[in-house]
Every structure is written in C-alpha cells, then in structure tokens.
Amino acid sequence: MSYKNYPMVSRIVFGRGSLNQLSDIIEPKRLNTKAPFIFLVDDVFQGNSWLTSRIPTAYDDTIIFISANEEPKTSQVDELVEQIILSHKDRPSGIIGIGGGTILDLAKAVSIMLTNEGEAKDYQGWDLVKTPAIYHVGIPTISGTGAEVSRTTVLTGPEKKLGINSDYTPFDQVILDPELTKDVPKDQWFYTGMDCYIHCIESLNGTFLNAFSQTYGEKAYDLCKEIFLDNNLSEEESQDKLMMASWHGGMSIAYSQVGVAHAMSYGLSYLLGTKHGIGNCIVFDHLEEFYPEGVKLFKQMKKSHNISLPQGICANLEDYQFDIMIDVALGLVPLWENAIGKHWNQVITREKLKALYQKM
Ligand code: NAD
Ligand code: ZN
C-alpha cells in the first residue's frame, strides 16, 4: 500500500478584518515593479468600496472583475491567461482570487496556466501539471465549497467537467476573513453551506473513510449542525464557524472522496448548467436511500431556513438527455466506489439513476 503525499496550503491567516493585511502579506512576494499582482475579483464587489478600497494595487497591478454567474470554463481560463500575458511585460508576481468557489478555482487555474504550455483542457485530470504555478492567494467571500483548501480546480471543458488535480493547485496563501461573507444572499448562503454539509455526509459515510478524513469531517459536521439547526449563534459567530466548517469539510475529502450527490450533481451541471451548491441540494433531497440520517437533517435545515428548492427540473427532458447526465455521473468511478464500495456497479444501474433524476 502506498499512501498519498499531499501538499497543503502553506500559509493561512484567520480573523475578521484580516483582509487589511493583504498588502503586508503580498508585497514581499513582488518580483519587480513590472511584474504585477493580478486580482481576480467577483464582480458582485464592483463598486463596493468597503471591499475594493482594501485591494492594495501599486505599479502595474490590475483588478479584473469576473462574473460568478456561470461556473469556470477551460476556455475562460485560457482567455484570462492571454489577456494577462498581452497586457504586461513581465510574468505576474502573483494571482489573488477574491470571491467564492468560482473565482477561487479560476485563480488557481490561471496561476497554473501562466507557467504551463498549452490549454487548460490539457490539464484536466490527475497530476498532469509539470511546472509549479506562480504564487497564488485565495480569499473566500462565501463559505462552503472548501475550494480554498483543496488540491483541485473544477473546470468545464469542451469534453468534460473535471478538475485540474495537482500538487501545484493548492494556494500558497489563504486569507480567511469571515466578515467578507456578511452580504451573501440567504439562499446562496444555504446552498454553498450545504455543499460543506454534503461533503461531510459523503465523506463520513463512504468506504474510503479513515481517521484523517473522519476527524476533519466530524468537526465540520458538528459545526454545520450548530450553524444550520441550533439557530442560537450570533451572525458573526455563524460566519466565523461556517468559514472553518468549509475548511474542515475540504480537508475531510482531501484524503477520501465525495459520493452520490456530487456524482449526480455533476450530471445536472454538465447538461443543464445547474450550479454546484444548488445542484447538490436538489440531488441530496432525494437520497434518503443512501444517506438516511443525513437527508433527514438536511430536510430539517431546509425547513428551518425556509428554503424551497426548484422542482421538476428534469420533468421535460428527453431520453438522450437523461443518457448524457447518466454518462457523466457514471464516469465518476472513485465517487461511486467511495459511496457504495468496489461492486458499486451492481447497485447503481442506468435505470436506477434515471429514476432518481426523474424525481428532481
Ligand atoms: P460562487 O463562487 O459561484 O458564488 C455564488 C454566488 O454568490 C455568486 O452570485 C457570487 O457573486 C455570490 N457571492 C459570493 N460572495 C459574495 C458576497 N460576499 N456577497 C454577496 N454575494 C456573494 O459560489 P460557490 O458555491 O462558492 O462556488 C461554486 C463553485 O465552486 C463551482 O464552480 C464549483 O465547481 C466549485 N467548487 C470547487 C471546489 C474545489 O475544491 N475546487 C469544491 C467545491 C466546489
Ligand atoms: Zn462540493
């Protein structure tokens, strides 16, 4: 048995208002005055001086605002890299992503593609990246995905939705400032927060479970219950704890895997463009059979926060469309192995997945 030797985020700051330290943190990493820092920022913050006035630009540093309405694409990464190369003489000193999973994943991918030849789609998979990425910093503004801590950047390419999983993907620096999440809309807070909850359920109930994953997963699971069920935390406590739950949930799946909800949600995302957080919720709502206790609590959380999920999103689909989703889901072999075990394909048939999708 050979155990995986994973890299981790090398430096991390935690604290409300810690964004104010960004300049002190990155300035020593400036290579020269012509090598800029590029800030990739969720465009929800465009015109928001509370946040943007604290982005420390000097010399040729550039802020690029990016919409998070759609999940990142390999072509979008390639375009950003080209834009950065064409508009600056020197290779950047660093890439700083400020936003949710969408922007964090773009920041990771762009930092990799600035030092590696070819197109982003060539690197979708496991350990295909040859050259270390340039210095990259992640600053989450919404909590749940674990993208701030993970070894992957999930991209939709021409042929597949698959991450660039590599030792060079994790951030060199993360700034966890829970105050940045204060204006997240309620529904989105729930969907992205549930991504963390579902990471815990899938990791803790998976066959890949080990003490490493379990300790992180249990902590994140307890935090999620406190945040989404107890309802007696202050807003600040809730923001702080969800940011740490996201971190622990991400660490939990680093050394195990996700499961049924993620496999099926990738199918929805590929065919219908359903975003990760809400897609996981739509699927998980129908997975009592696989995660009875987890789904029961999920329904309580939904009720307690008055969340109504979209219904009937697969109602008018044709057979060939179900087939596309089923192919995507079945392609994610490690997720099924984790969820069901080695002989998963005796249980998970195309008919079974179709019947589940038809309920959504
Ligand atoms: P997101 O980044 O897509 O953002 C969701 C919405 O919230 C957007 O409209 C965004 O503008 C808004 N938003 C973000 N911060 C805000 C704030 N502070 N105030 C107001 N609005 C704010 O959401 P997400 O759920 O964090 O990320 C989903 C993405 O993460 C997907 O692309 C998914 O594939 C990816 N993901 C990656 C990993 C990984 O390990 N790399 C893990 C899970 C998910
Ligand atoms: Zn997820």
Image (cartoon, rainbow, N blue to C red):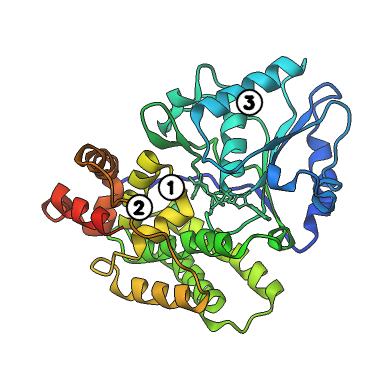
Q: Can you identify the residue that label 1 sits on?
A: 274
Q: Are marks 2 and 1 in contact (CB under 8 Å)?
A: yes
Q: Quadrant of residue 68?
A: top right
Label 2, label 1: how many angstroms apart (C-alpha)? 10 Å
> Is 109 placed above or below 217 here?
above
Which secondary structure, mark 1?
Answer: loop
Q: Position of residue 5 (x, y in %)?
A: 45, 45
* Residue at (53% x, 65% y) in the render: 190
> Is 99 placed above or below 127 here?
below
Which secondary structure, mark 3?
Answer: helix
Could you classify mark 2 by the number of other residues whose Cα lies within 10 Å: few (under 14), some (14-19), or many (20 or more)? some
Q: Can you identify the residue that label 2 sits on?
A: 313
Label 3, label 2: how many angstroms apart (C-alpha)? 32 Å
Q: Quadrant of residue 188?
A: bottom right
Q: Quadrant of residue 124?
A: top left
Q: Can you identify the residue that label 3 sits on?
A: 80
Image position of 231 (left or right of 174)? left
In the orientation shown, which residue stands out farthest toward the left?
346
Q: Is residue 161 visible?
A: yes
- Residue 86 vs residue 319, the one in the foreground: 319
Instruction: Tell me the number on the disc at residue 89.
Output: none
Q: How many marks?
A: 3
